[in-house]
Amino acid sequence: MKSFVSLVLILLVSGALSAQAVLNDIRFIPPTFFVGDAVELRITFSHDGPLAVAPPDSIPESDWVDIKDVFLIQDDNTVTVVIAFTPFAPGTRTLPPMKLGALQLKDIKVPTHSIIENSHEGVRSLRGQLLMPGTRLAVALILSLAAMAPFLGYGLFRFSWKWVKKSRQLYRVGRPVRRLRRVIKKLKAGIGSMQAPLWYYELTEALRAYLSDRSHHDCRSATTAEIALMSEFLVDDTPQKDLLEILKEGDMVKFAGRFADDRSLNKTLEMVTSAVGKWEKADAQLQ
């Protein structure tokens, strides 16, 4: 095919030249080119005398090719016409005619290749619908989640129910200490304005309610001596024992008239706060 095109070019261009010039070579650089490639066509003539040649006054235009430049390379016996162009259509097409002084260039065939093979074989069957990248993966993931939704929903329901139950349990467990701490806050503010027997009365009542909830014994109606015989209060150096001592101190102030100033009341609140904190911490570690 290449030899045939070259032969046609030689015959066509030779017929357009004067007797003083002979076509020597026609060369495409690169030899094989495709739509959109930058190409040079070099046409070389030899001559035996002066040859009046010059670049064209204007570069011809065409709808299938963009001719960027036309220039001449001359020496004593040869002249080379260089045509720089970019083709935009596949197949063999003809360059527009050019007048270069004494040279007339016409019927120059340009074979342009296409990277799309068999692009003109008729109507092709419809292709499948194009999908965005990752569409199949997304669809598979959605279907998998839909299949697992009942199991995930059941697991989430169980987790939520357990969390609600535990939260309610912790709230109930923490209710006695919250009540006691509110009384402690009130009594701390009342130091200096409340009489000591009344002050101890409110403290011991709150302590007995707290001890009843924590020990699961009726410490509200039991006497201090009866509380001391309960198993939770028999061990020394425990928070329960410290709270029992505060109950005894309160009985002495309420019923025996023991003196208690503001300093001793503050110290009593510090002991209650410390003992309750230790008891709550120990219970939290057991749960």
Image (cartoon, grey):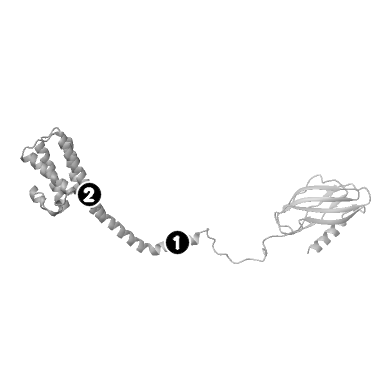
Residue placed furthest toward the top:
192
Residue placed furthest toward the left:
256
N-terminal label among 2 and 1? 1
What element does badge 2 sit on? Answer: helix
**Residue 229 coordinates in the image, percent (x, y):** 10, 52
Q: Is residue 221 left or right of residue 172?
A: left
Q: Is residue 71 visible?
A: yes
Residue receiving disc 2: 280
Residue at (35, 63) in percent of width and height: 151
Residue at (45, 61) in percent of width and height: 141
**Residue 154 coordinates in the image, percent (x, y):** 32, 62
Residue receiving disc 1: 141
State which mark lies toward you, 2 or 1: 2
Quadrant location, the N terminus: bottom right
Quadrant location, the C terminus: bottom left
Distance between mark 2 and mark 1 Cα atoms: 48 Å
Q: Quadrant of residue 116?
A: bottom right
Characterize the local packing of mark 1: few (<14), some (14-19) or many (20 or more) Cα atoms within 10 angstroms: few
Residue at (46, 63) in percent of width and height: 140
Q: How many marks?
A: 2
